[in-house]
Amino acid sequence: MAETKETQKAQAAESKAAEAKTEVKETVSQEEFLKNFNWHNYQEGIDQVEDEKLKEFENLVEENFVDTADEEVVEGTVVHLTDREAIIDINAKSEGVISLNEFRYNPNLKVGDKVEVLIDVREDKTGQLVLSHRKARTIKAWDRVNAAHDKGEIVNGFVKCRTKGGMIVDVFGIEAFLPGSQIDVKPIRDYDAYVGKTMEFKVVKINHEFKNVVVSHKALIEADIEEQKKEIIGQLEKGQVLEGTVKNITSYGVFIDLGGVDGLIHITDLSWSRINHPNEVVELDQKLNVVILDFDDNKSRIQLGLKQLQKHPWEALGDEVKVGDKVKGKVVVIADYGAFIEVADGVEGLIHVSEMSWSTHLRSAQDFVNVGDEVEAVVLTLDREDRKMSLGIKQLTPDPWTDITSKYPVGSKHTGIVRNFTNFGVFVELEEGIDGLIYISDLSWTKKIKHPSEFVNVGDKLEVEVLELDVEGRKLSLGHKQTTENPWDKYETEFAEGTVHNAEISEIVDKGATIDFNEDIVAFVPSRHLEKEDGKKLKKGETADFKIIEFNKEFKRVVASHTAIFKEEEEKNVKAAAKRSNQAEKTTLGDANAELQALKDKMEGKN
């Protein structure tokens, strides 16, 4: 314990001695420290640099490093690429990083490429230089777009997406509109095929007010085509064979791209065979050889041919085909006047409607054949020079008029079908090829017919009698009323002149009235014959006795009179009175004569 205390005292003594020694040393060195202290370093935080060294350093910085002011556009170099980022050197204290999403318009970006960037932030929290290529492009974009428009320069653009009526294209960071009609010189069938592509464009329109830009890829193609067009047009000659590409197909023909110059193949010049639509022969983008048939003075309208490169089918038609032969073919066209039959590829013959049936009553060709029908026909005429052929179908069956006199003699009765009307009569078909005419006057014994449609309809069956037969003229005269008895033969007796009938006044007409004796006979009563015994006239609806005063079977005319009935009685009474008077006068005169005779006889007797 005592030893410990001694030890502590010794240590304390040593400590005090050391402190005293230090105080002396500090007093001596403080003066030296203040004298030699670097006040510039203390105030500026760095050591003082000599002016000459400082100037040298400033020159080096000015030459090698950019002024990294915020929101400034500078040019940088791609020094490294990762899967997601691009490392850009702008000669600053550090390198910047930009996401590859900002370079989607340029998928071919590589190390060493120069790009414009905007200094977004000089240093972020981690001391990293933050750059933006998208913002830099936006700032510079309008200047570049305007310059490209004014100078007619070609620009690159990235097709971002499809929109209504066209595409959206990234040009210098600006979303420009590419109309569908300005993508290519030929119609576009798949717009989506262009999405994601980088293409060359020409700025064709800028709307500064609405910040709209319209670009065109077609304009670049047209410029190249125009040069090719001038060269091709200068070499065009009729009969020249060129290779072309089917550009467009219409209902009337095909447009062919001859390498900048368009020509038209009319549908009739596509094939020697008759076709309904050009797509039966060609298809879009098909390459084929064509021959120049004609062109205008400016060579802007070029007429081309495809079938002319092949041998004409008529030249290949065998010599074995001759008039009278039977041929088979397909109906390709139907007209009112006939049907065209393709008997071989490119070889057609016409069957006129008159050669389709032995009937003299012509009908439409559609009543006999349809398009696509396979038919057999007889060759009637054949002209190889003019390439014409006429055919007939009716010649395959016997002519029904050969035995007409035995089948349809005059006076024979038959049943036919009403086929057609005229103003003067009805055509009735007795069989295929045998038609006859019923004049309107031979339809009915009793009815007054103004038009046949009042009596029959087309398609009705009708009983007829052969009235006349002209074999050479192939004409039949028929009658319908002759198949029944003439009721006027009976009426001639029943309604003979002088007969009296009771009837009602049907109608009051001009100059008289009409009465219906039956469904066939309508009699006319003159106005003066309507007078009754009391002096008044009969009115509509009144019933009275009428005397027939005229009956004409040929003209079917009947005239009646009511007045004649009582006038006749009066005449009878007058005649009776006159007769009695005459008799009385005869009696008186006879008596006188008798007396005179008696007196005479007496006198003679006396003598």
Image: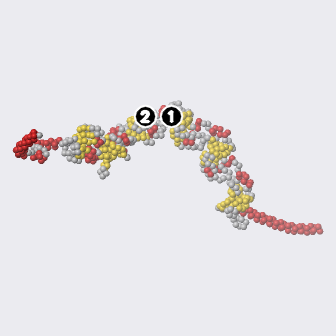
Residue 264, which numbered label?
none
User: What amino acid is at disc 2?
Assistant: Leu
Drawn side of residue 228 relative to residue 378, left or right: left
- Say which residue label 2 marks: 309
Front residue of 122/526: it is 122
Local packing at callout 2 (Cα closer than 10 Å; few below 14, some 14-19, many 20+) is few
The answer to whether residue 376 shows anywhere in this view is: yes
Drawn side of residue 353 relative to residue 218, left or right: right
- Badge 1 marks a residue whose secondary structure is strand
Residue that sits furthest to the front in the current view:
2
Q: Quadrant of the N terminus?
A: top left
In the rendered image, residue 5, in percent from the top left (x then y), is placed at: 10, 41
Local packing at callout 1 (Cα closer than 10 Å; few below 14, some 14-19, many 20+) is some
> Which image quadrant is residue 310 in?
top left
Q: Where is 580 relative to 144, above or below?
A: below
Q: Residue at x 94, y 67 (%)?
A: 605
Q: Where is 572 relative to 392, above or below?
A: below
